[in-house]
Structure formats: C-alpha cells, structure tokens
Image (cartoon, grey):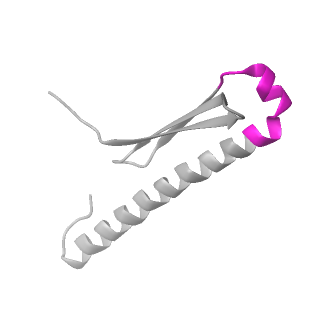
Amino acid sequence: MLKTTKSISLSGQSIIGETQVANFNANINSDNGSSNINSNIMNQTLYDANKAEVRKDLADFNTAVYEVEDQLDAETQKTNHQAESNGETPA
C-alpha cells in the first residue's frame, strides 16, 4: 500500500561577502504541520568571524519557517471550521 505525504521545503543560505558560510533547510509536513530544521556551517573560519550575522540569518530563517507553519495552521483551522459549519467531522 502506498502512503504519500505532502510537504513544503524551505532553504536558505548565509552569505558573507560572496562566500556561503551556512546552509539552512526546513521540511514542513503539510498534513500535520510538524517541521524539521537543519543548519550546516560551510566555512568555519568565516562563521567564527561573523557569528552574530550568521546567527541573525538563522533566526530570520526560523522566523520564515514559523510563518509557513502558522499559515498551514490557519488553513487547517479554517477548513475544520468550514467542515463543522457544514455538519461534517473535521479531518
């Protein structure tokens, strides 16, 4: 039996000058809203010299992920409310 899931992927990069210092990835399950966020340091020397900026980029990336999670949650609540209004059982 095949079971499929729908997910949303986000990616971001922290760039210092013209060099990628860190890579950020997130995968958000559209069915239940659970998410997985990963970060990888690509250039340790530049990271060490620019921690505040790279960490701000990571915080901004996390905020972008949270916004998508909140959008999915709002859509789910709206769908559930519409189902209840129609006398249906929400998913």
Residue 21 colored magenta?
Answer: no
Q: Left of 15 or right of it: where is 85?
A: left
The answer to whether 8 is drawn above or below residue 18 in the figure is: below
- Quadrant in the rendering for residue 7: top left
The answer to whether 39 is drawn above or below residue 44 in the figure is: below
The answer to whether 71 is drawn above or below residue 64 in the figure is: below
Q: Which residue appears at 81% of the width and 35% of the height? A: 51
Q: Residue furthest front?
A: 18
Q: Quadrant of the N terminus?
A: top left
Q: Quadrant of the C terminus?
A: bottom left
Q: Which residue appears at 29% of the width and 67% of the height? A: 79
37, 80: nearer the viewer: 37
Q: Which residue appears at 66% of the width and 35% of the height? A: 15
So how many labels did they put on this image? 0
Question: x%, y% of residue 38?
Answer: 58, 32
Q: Left of 23 or right of it: where is 48?
A: right
Question: x%, y% of residue 90?
Answer: 26, 63
The answer to whether 21 is drawn above or below residue 85 in the figure is: above
Question: x%, y% of residue 63?
Answer: 61, 53
Q: Residue furthest left?
A: 1
40, 14: nearer the viewer: 14
The prevailing secondary structure element of the residues shown in magenta is helix
Q: Residue furthest bottom?
A: 85
Question: x%, y% of residue 55?
Answer: 74, 40
Q: Residue furthest right?
A: 49
Q: Which residues are magenta?
A: 41-54
Q: Which residue appears at 80% of the width and 21% of the height? A: 45
Q: Left of 69 or right of it: where is 52?
A: right
9, 5: nearer the viewer: 9
